[in-house]
Amino acid sequence: MFIDFSEITDKHDFELFCAHLLETIGYRIIKAPSLGNDHGIDIICEAPVEHAEIGYRWAVSCKHSKNSLGVGDDTFDPFYVRSQLCSGFMAIYSSRPTSGLDTKLSRIGQPQSISVKVFSGRDIERVLIGKPECYPVFRQYFPRSFHSLIGSKRNNYCECCNQELNPLDRIFLVSYVDTHTRAVVTSQVGPCCFDGLLTHLQETGVAHDYQVLRDDGYY
Ligand SMILES: [Zn+2]
């Protein structure tokens, strides 16, 4: 993982972050997070639907945890979701759901035909790193991660070969364990070196990870 989710220390702050992120990527917040627990639903939001007054409504459950989340960690009541005029249930988790919880969530909505969407820490990370419009939210809630990943890297160079990149080239953030120092290195890499570097890391069995920092012609 690139983002240190422990920068958010409070459960309620995580809910506020989720609402802020949803708003930034185009959802309208119908019910903002409050301090009480409402049947496990923290936020109600709506994706606009063209020519419709009411959009597609989601009941959102936010869970902030260091450990992966298991079957008992999210109790989602499809009847309550329906009673709030929601068509979907969205789970936003700072860590990874176990496959048991994933399966439970995907099945539980079926009898009520509720769509279920799970956003794990990896998915949040993909959005925060890959969408520049999310950078203000990223910086506000994860200042240290933002600074080390984005703040110091807004140039157009491949750090692997030191070539200047084409402004429309994809840029990847690749992190791996340096075999000499054992430190985790994060490097900004262009298409010139990405495939070669990844193959090398796979072949040598070095622990690694990557995210898209700038997509094809994104700007
Ligand atoms: Zn390169």
Image (cartoon, helix red, strand yellow):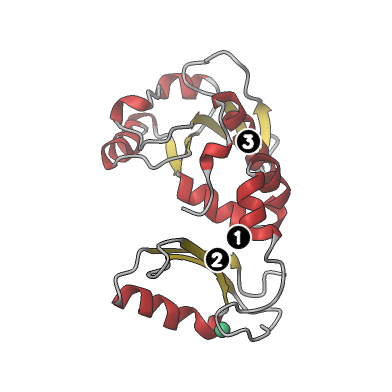
Q: Looking at the image, is mark 2 or mark 3 earlier in the sequence?
A: 3
Establish whether ligand 1 lies closer than 8 Å to the Cβ of label 3.
Answer: no
x%, y% of residue 214?
Answer: 62, 68
x%, y% of residue 156?
Answer: 70, 76
What is the crowding at mark 2: few (fewer than 14 residues within 10 Å), some, or many (at least 20)? some
Compare residues 112 and 35 and report the one nearer the observer: 35
Residue at 60% across / 75% down in the picture? Answer: 170
Mark 1: amino acid: Gly
Which residue in the structure is indicated by mark 3?
17
Mark 2: amino acid: Val
**Ligand 1 location (quadrant):** bottom right
Secondary structure at numbered mark 1: helix
Q: Is the residue under label 3 in contact with that under label 1 (CB below 8 Å)?
A: no
Which residue in the structure is indicated by mark 2?
212
Residue at far top of view:
36
Q: Is the residue under label 3 in contact with that under label 2 (CB below 8 Å)?
A: no
Residue at 29% across / 70% down in the picture? Answer: 205
As drawn, the label of residue 130 is: 1
Q: Is the residue under label 1 in contact with that under label 2 (CB below 8 Å)?
A: yes
Compare residues 32 and 14 and report the one nearer the observer: 14
Residue at 63% across / 41% down in the picture? Answer: 22
Q: Looking at the image, is mark 1 or mark 3 earlier in the sequence?
A: 3
